[in-house]
Image (cartoon, grey):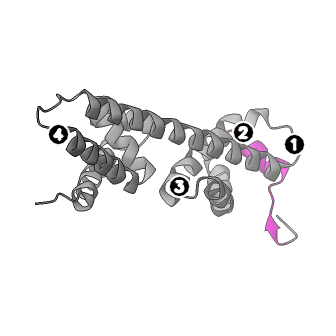
Amino acid sequence: MREEGRPIFADQHIEKMIEGDEAAFRLFVETYRTYLYQVVYSVLHHAKDAEDVTQEVFIQIYLSLPHYRSQGFKTWITRIAVNKAIDAKRKQRRRNEELEERMEEVVSSDAIAEDAEAPLLQKEKQLQLHDCLQELSPSHRRAVYAYYFEGKSYKEIAAETGVATKTVESALYRAKQLMRKNWREEP
C-alpha cells in the first residue's frame, strides 16, 4: 500500500508481523531499512554505528509490536529509532569519557623516571595515544577499550556488542594497524 508516494503498512500486515509471519517482517525491513537508517544516521553521524543501531531498532520494533496501538505506525517506528540512536550516542559518550579516564590512569600510574625529561616524554606519549585513539571509529575505540583496558575476551566483546567473534578480532586488528600508522615516534 502507498500513501503520497510512500509505503505504508496496513493494520492486517502489522497483525501478520505480530503473529510471527517472517515474510511480513522481511517485507517491513525491506520497506523501511533505508528510512530508519537515515533517521539513526541523522543522530549518530557515523555510518557503521548507524548500521549497528538500525539493526537494534528492527529488533526493538519486532519485540514491541504487540504493544503497538494502531496510531501512526511510521511515527511509532521513527520514535523507536530516534530513542535507540540517542541511547547509543549517550553510551558512546560515556565510553569515550571512561576510556580517556582509564588512559590517564594507566599513563600516570607508570613509574616516574628519575631524569627530568621523563615526565615531559610521558605526557607527550599520553597525548599521542589519546590522539591515536580519537582517530579510530567509535566501534574500534570501544573494542580497544574493552579488550585492552577491561581485559575482556573476543567472545565477551562479541556477546556484548552483538557481532561475530571474527568481527571483533578484525576490529581490533584494524584498530592496531591504524594506531601504528598514526603513531609518530621521533628518532
Q: Disc 2 vs disc 4: Cβ atoms closer than 8 Å?
A: no
64, 124: nearer the viewer: 124
- Label 2 or label 3, whichever comes before in sequence order: 2
Q: According to the image, label 2 marks what residue?
A: 18
Q: Is residue 152 visible?
A: no
Residue 23 is one of the magenta-drawn residues: no
Q: Residue furthest bottom?
A: 5
Residue 9 is one of the magenta-drawn residues: yes
- Label 4 or label 1, whichever comes before in sequence order: 1
Q: According to the image, label 4 marks what residue?
A: 118
Q: Amino acid at mark 3?
A: Glu
Task: Please tell me which residue is depicted at 24% across the width and 43% down the height of the picture.
Answer: 120
Q: x%, y% of residue 12? A: 82, 48
Q: Disc 4 vs disc 1: Cβ atoms closer than 8 Å?
A: no
Mark 2–mark 3 Cα distance, whole angstroms, equals: 24 Å
The residue carrying pointer 4 sits among few (fewer than 14), some (14 to 19) or many (20 or more) residues within 10 Å by Cα, namely few
Q: According to the image, label 3 marks what residue?
A: 51
Q: According to the image, label 1 marks what residue?
A: 70
Q: Amino acid at mark 1?
A: Ser
- Secondary structure under badge 3? helix
Tell me, for residue 82, which label it has, or none. Answer: none
Task: Please tell me which residue is depicted at 22% across the width and 38% down the height of the picture.
Answer: 119
Q: Amino acid at mark 4?
A: Ala
